[in-house]
Image (cartoon, rainbow, N blue to C red):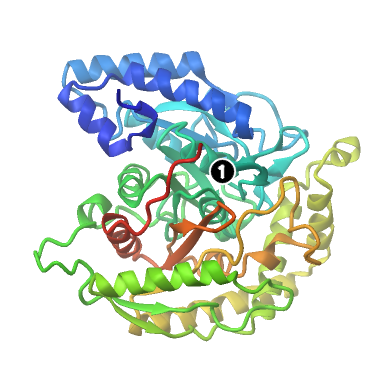
Amino acid sequence: MTDLTALSAERLVAGYRAGELSPVEVARATLDRAAAAQHAVNAFVLLLEEEALEQARASERRWHRREPAGPLDGVPVTVKDILLLRGHPTLRGSAAAATAPNEEDAPAVARLRESGAVFLGKTTTPEYGWKGVTDCPPHGATGNPRAPERTAGGSSGGGAAAVALGAGPLSLGTDGGGSVRIPAAFCGVFALKPTYGRVPLHPASAFGTLAHVGPMTRDARDAALLLDVIGHPDPRDWSHLGEPPAAFSDGLTDDSGSGAPLRGVRIAYSPTLGPLPPGAPPVDPEIAAAVRRGAERLAELGAEVEEVDPSLPDPLVVREAFHTLWFSGAARATAGITGASRELMDPGLREVCATGERYSAVEYLAAVDVRMAMGRLMGAFHERHDLLLTPTLPLTAFGLGREVPEGSGMRRWTEWTPFTYPFNMTQQPAASVPCGLHSDGLPMGLQLVGPRHADAVVLRVAHALYAAGGTALPPPE
């Protein structure tokens, strides 16, 4: 029998179209898996069984009439509890958040609803999505699908865990410093942080233009299908990019018949993104070897691969500039939480908010200067290289309920994520692609970074890796 929870969104839609699969049966199977994922790793803050089944029944009626609402009609999807879902509260991992139901959907959620997607529930996040692991006072910690005593990563950890465990093939996350890519690497799934503005956001993030909305999926093709639905303008976001020039799913394959699908693609392979900032852990040798094998696979697929660093500014300066922007945003996000309610907040979040409150406008603008300098450097770099390849993370998942690995001497999550947050500062598209299992049994990831607006190139190269079999991982038990 076919395991319905193992099917991609593309395969589900093909099955609905052919009359071979039932959206209702798929919804029931994925809801069962979601309940199991919740028991195993705490992936959800809200499961919507009756609502999802009602949406699935409506989808089934549309497919019987051969009138699907859109390209993802009947496909189960989960939504990070940072994004608005109409009829339900957005708790943001906070005991102090308002609990009134939202009266509107976030733009990406609205596009999915219009397409007939089936909403399974809302996934866990740290408080206000502030850190690279997923735990918060009201909802607890989210475990890794392959080792529940380890972290799923964050801040979109619940969504990545849900996808890895078959609780829906698609999940919406947000990424302000790596928050879809970090859990994707730890959980062994695919994630894309699109170019800033490609997926509209409302309400605007307190973290400003660092925060992107992006897909977490089982492969690059499903991510392209999801981006085709959510990557359209919304008047509530003045910074959206307008209509995409073409469907992302149409640009995944090379039709030349050359057998070299990446012929002519210029890829810069950087093992460490230049000097690591002080306190950052060295790249684990097994991860380094896996990423190098990924570079070799890309060369076999026809890409021109060169080992070169992008020569970013001093990594400590970059990290401190990110802290200025990020911690100020955290302070702004929580400014309305006072008195006894503030004592309910994550202690680490209270610390970074206190730091953020002390920054002056001049210090904030100095961090913006660093950001602009990085953007100029990366713009020039991509004149010579179509993509940049790095590790996603220098380590595999560590112990649950910790911001940093035990005994590491690190204080903040940014110390072990030196390859992710720089590309939030530059607003570039960046994807995490699985590249094998470590000897500890946990997934490893490589990162593909493109110039602004080159989301299609990032997806094409990632899809080529999937098509060549360079990303296959055994499913979690």
For the residue pair 254 and 477, the one nearer the viewer reads as 477
Query: At 76% across and 54% down in the image, what residue appears?
Result: 331
Residue 418 horizontal side relative to residue 255, left or right: right
| Residue appearing at x 44%, y 41% in the figure | 475
Amino acid beneath label 1: Arg
Give the tally of numbered discs. Answer: 1
Under tag 1, what secondary structure?
Answer: loop
User: Quadrant location of residue 403?
Assistant: bottom right
| Residue 282 location (% of width, % of height) | 64, 74
Quadrant (top left, top right, bottom left, bottom right) of the N terminus: top left
Q: Position of residue 404 (x, y in %)?
A: 74, 58
Which residue, as the protein is rendered here, is positioned at the far front? 439
Q: Compared to 226, does 275 lie above or below?
A: below
Q: Is residue 5 above or below residue 383?
A: above
The answer to whether any part of residue 389 appears in the image is no
**Residue at the spot 58% in from the left edge and 74% down from the top edge:** 371
Q: Which residue occupies the foreground of this view, 82 or 280? A: 280
Question: Is 62 placed above or below 476 here?
Answer: above
Visible residue check, residue 31? yes
Q: Position of residue 265 (x, y in %)?
A: 26, 75
Say left or right for 66 vs 477. left
Mark 1: few, some, or many residues within 10 Å (few <14, many ≥20)? Answer: many
- Nearer to the camera, 177 or 34: 34
Q: Report which residue position mark 1 lands on.
A: 146
Q: Compared to 234, does 210 lie above or below?
A: below
Q: Position of residue 124 (x, y in %)?
A: 62, 37
Residue 278 occupies which quadrant of the picture? bottom right
The image quadrant of residue 146 is: top right
Residue plotted at (51% across, 30% down): 104
